Image (cartoon, helix red, strand yellow):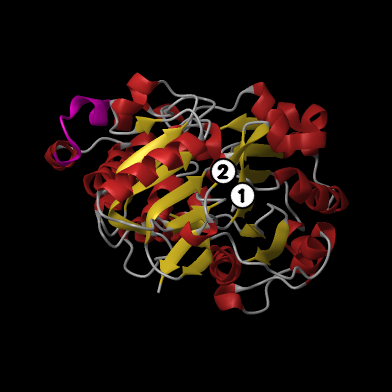
Amino acid sequence: MKVTLPYLNTTFPLEFPDENLLAIAEPNAFNASGSTEEILAEAFAYTTGEGKGTGQSLDAFLSGCEKLLILVNDATRPTPTETILKSLLPAIKAAGIDWKNCTILVAAGAHRKPSEEEYRQILGIYYNSLRNSCIAHDARNDAEMLDLGSTRNGTPILLNKRLFEADRIIVTGSVEPHYFAGFTGGRKAFLPGIAAYRTIQENHKQALSPAARSLALEGNPVHEDMMDVLPLIKAPVFSIMTVLDKDQGVAAATAGDLIGSFLGAVDVAKKIFSVSVPAKADIVVSVAKFPMDIDLYQSQKAIDNGAAALKDGGTLILVSSCRDGIGDEAYANLLSSASSPADALAKIREGYKLGYHKAAKMAAVSERAVISAVSELSEERLKSMFIHKEKTPQAALDEAFRRARAGGVAVPRITILPDGCVTVPDPS
């Protein structure tokens, strides 16, 4: 068996006997209804209303608008923002809205502000014409926030005040599985997208709950917090959600009511990203593809999904450049301060900081399995987080074979996740 794995601007070969392969688990094929432009046009023509009923058209939504706010994802998400803008801008022009009264707000949550290269990635061909209208949310700037109370779980709700200065709001995004919010997209544009740091911290603390997991919405406290924000938004909201296929092309799009379009996209996302595998494997190779390979904070999703397909005592091999480093420092520092994964989990129970949910998920995997990584991160840095560095996927696999056979497994079985950040394996 020969497999090619993407890494930065190149690929790594991986070779092993056919008898060792258990599964190659990647997003399921999905028959798109047409080109990306046709899919978006169809979504705009058949908008969803509340509860997925017939919704207001984009033209009707924009009628009478004087001040427009557009929320877009940052560069850590594969959302085709440029393509969405290509379909959206003509409608804005036709509505007679003066562009000087339009703001594109990057819903960066607690992430850092985009670099200029990343602004180019987000805006694409519209970089030169729209860059001056595009700004990034800064979760740490309390002067930019309005206090709106708290959620049913006690999470304080502080949101960017620009949300309440616009008379129309357009939300764009992509919907795929999320390891503790259930799914990305929809309500996540507001929380964590344009929420204050302490709001995000308290919301993400809910990720420690066992109910906060991939594909789960009902009973998920993280999702509940996000939903509690929506009734507080006074201006009308028009949502444009995309679902990508395994090649990151647009498979489907929904538009209209925020909840209706989100749930419609969730239905498609489940069909694409929830993937059956025959059983749990002795070895799982999980790849964080661009743009999720930006750092370990984002690539951790590939660890979490890969762990769902891994036997206790097995080896999980993460393939991710982590080209921008580790991301947020808090989770890495927590892990580095612990003597063991169990000690890390104990420290998290003593006091939570934003990012510790990431450490908790990683420590939980390290408690029951070995994690190896092919990455640009240093051996010392990875070791401090209970991860073994390997030079190539083949070297990592050879070592995993050795461990498995030393443990009495005659024929170690392998599952490969070529797009581990969004593929949710379901061992039957």
Label for residue 94?
Answer: none
Of the pair 337 and 137, the residue shown nearer to us = 337
Residue 139 falls in image quadrant: top left
Residue 366 falls in image quadrant: top left
Q: Position of residue 381 (x, y in %)?
A: 35, 22
User: In the figure, 196 relative to 173: above or below?
Assistant: above
Residue receiving disc 1: 2
Q: In the displayed image of the protein, which residue is found farthest to the bottom?
A: 53
Residue receiving disc 2: 14
- Can residue 335 be found in the magenta stretch? yes
Q: Is residue 419 left or right of residue 250?
A: left
| Magenta residues, start to end | 333-342
**Residue 155 appears in the picture as rendered:** no
Question: Residue visible at 87% across and 52% down?
Answer: 94
Question: Residue visible at 32% across and 49% down?
Answer: 404
Mark 2 closeness class: few <14, some 14–19, many ≥20 residues within 10 Å = some
> Residue type at mark 1?
Lys
> Residue type at mark 2?
Leu
Q: Position of residue 34 (x, y in %)?
A: 83, 66
Secondary-structure class at tag 1: strand
- Can residue 70 be found in the magenta stretch? no
Question: Residue visible at 65% across and 57% down?
Answer: 246
Label the magenta part by its dominant secondary structure: helix
Of the pair 416 and 255, the residue shown nearer to us = 416
Q: Position of residue 72 (x, y in %)?
A: 63, 43
The reply to whether callout 1 and callout 2 are in contact (CB within 8 Å) is: yes
Q: Is residue 26 left or right of residue 62?
A: left
* Mark 1 vs 2, N-terminal side: 1
